[in-house]
Image: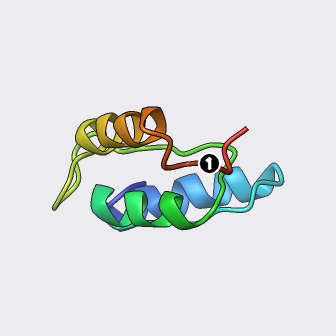
Amino acid sequence: MEDNELNQEVATELLRDVGFVVELAENGQIALNKIRSAQYDIVLMDMQMPVMDGVTATQEYARMRASGIFRWWR
């Protein structure tokens, strides 16, 4: 997740060039909403984002995963 447009473009192109499917979120809260509803193999977080930063989003993700919210997770 990355909020800077130029960084989004660069990262997206690099990842797509090696075969990844890329989906973006503008902030950590949107990222959490996305990972609640779909399974992702990897999530990259920017540490400084509006609304919810990547550190807080990652901590919340870990809390939700430990509580069993992600039943589809391997």
Quadrant location of the C terminus in the rendered image: top right
Query: Residue 33 occupies which quadrant of the picture?
Result: bottom left
Kindly give the residue lying farthest to the right in the view shown.
19
Q: Nearer the viewer, residue 11 or 40?
A: 40
Where does the image place residue 73, in percent across and percent down from the top left?
66, 43
Q: How is the image coloured?
A: rainbow
Mark 1 crowd level (few <14, some 14–19, many ≥20, 10 Å Cα):
few
**Residue 27, visible in the rendered structure:** no
Q: Which residue is mark 1?
A: 71
Task: Classify 7 as above or below 24.
Answer: above
Q: Is residue 49 left or right of residue 67?
A: left
* Residue beneath the point at 17% across and 60% down: 50
Quadrant location of the N terminus in the rendered image: bottom left
Q: Nearer the viewer, residue 55 or 70?
A: 70
Kindly give the residue lying farthest to the left in the view shown.
51
**Amino acid of disc 1:** Arg
Task: Classify 60 as above or below 49.
Answer: above
**Residue 34, visible in the rendered structure:** yes
Where does the image place residue 21, in percent across and percent down from the top left?
73, 62
Q: Is residue 67 left or right of residue 68?
A: left
* Residue beneath the point at 31% across and 34% down: 59
Task: Classify 28 as above or below 46.
Answer: below
Query: Residue 42 occupies which quadrant of the picture?
Result: top right
* Residue beneath the point at 35% across and 35% down: 63
Q: How many marks?
A: 1
* Label 1 SS: loop
Query: Residue 57 occupies which quadrant of the picture?
Result: top left
Q: Nearer the viewer, residue 17 or 67?
A: 67
